[in-house]
Amino acid sequence: MDTEKSSNSSFEDLSNLNENDKNELTKIKNDTEEEQHQEQVEKQDTGIMDILGNGQLVKKIIQKGTTDERPERNDIVKINYTGRLEDGTIVEEEKDFIVQVGDVEVVQGLDMAIPLMNIGEIAEVIVNSRFAYGEQGLRNEDDSTKSIPADATLVYTVELLSIKEESDLENKSFSARKEIGNRKRLRGNFWMKRQEYNLAIQSYRRALEYLDESEGGITDPTPDGELPPTNSQLQELLEDRIKVNNNLALAQLKISAYDAALKSVEAVLQCQPNNAKALYRKGKILDAKGNTAAAIPLLQKAATIDADDKLIQSELSKLIIKSKREARNEKDLYQKMLGQAQKLEQKSKTTQKHENKEASKFKLWGYLMGSILVGVAGVAIYRYNKYF
């Protein structure tokens, strides 16, 4: 045995195997691959698909589709679906429901499963709470028996009725843009209320694509012959866009994406410099970035414009107190630093004075010693001259 190879090595040394051993290993390998292949075939035959590979999102075919056509991202699909708790309680149900794939207009689990369905297919989709309504669940305001508990796994029965490719923006009419954009805005509001800010941001950004008349040639007649939008209609789009940008800025602020939030709120203030909500949020963003001094005037302006908004008044008071505290701390720090500097200067002067005093003493002793030496030398010379 090779002394350089450990007995617990993580790889196998096949160099010393005889032919029979090699054949046996090859047979085992082939049998294993065959078993794995058979398992995959059985899953395909039963129509079971573990989409994420961890059991948290599983699709089972109930009825095969009539074609092999599947939706792609941004396609518009029409579906029927029913959502149940594991005990069979129906908590969601929609007929002829329109969904744009990939825009989280349904729970994430369904949004990921729909692209794996064929037209005409009916499937059961088991969605772990992580990809449904999570630890918050979902309260049904109209019927409490249909509320979704926290951490609930949902079982959906979904039928894919049709697929339609999304048309280019330049081919969409004013009314279509407004309807789709506001639907996505409301979906963003839904995610905001649930504090799922990244999903809200995704919905708001998609809403802006439809509500922005500067891209896609909205001022030209559509293929259906719809006339260009009037100024009042464009103003409506602008108002909708301002709502989206304000909410987008808030969602970005919540995840500390301050630069992106600042860009979103500036888009509002360029159109409406006196928008109180935008001024308030810009002030919050600047304060979060550490510029409280620049934030206060913005909140003061917002408070003047909307004097009844208690939230603005409260935040303004907090920032003023914070600013005064920071100024006081800065003053205390300056005085402390100044005191330290004065102490160092006094110490330096004392040291210098002591050194000068010591130098004077040394000089005086030098004079005395010099005088004594001169006297001694004089006496010595006198005596020398006397005797010689």
Image (cartoon, rainbow, N blue to C red):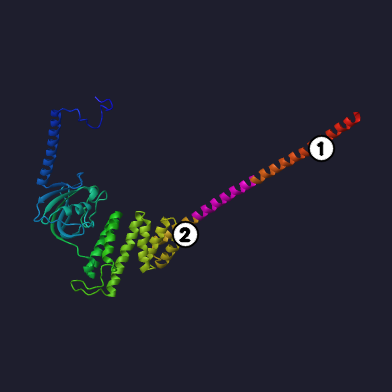
Q: Answer left or right for 377 relative to 152.
A: right
- Is residue 323 located in the magenta-colored stretch of the structure? no
Q: Which residue is mark 2?
A: 293
- Residue 38 in picture, x, y percent from top left: 11, 41
Whether residue 277 appears in this view of the structure is no
Q: Which residue is mark 1?
A: 371
Closer to the camera in the image, 253 or 217: 217
Which SS class for mark 2? helix
Q: Residue furthest front?
A: 388
Closer to the camera in the image, 62 or 371: 371
Gap between marks 1 and 2 measured at Cα: 73 Å
Asked which quadrant contains residue 305, the reply is: bottom left
Q: Amino acid at mark 2?
A: Ala
Which SS class for mark 1? helix
Range of magenta residues:
325-347
Disc number placed over residue 245 in the picture, else none: none
Q: Answer left or right for 220 relative to 313.
A: left
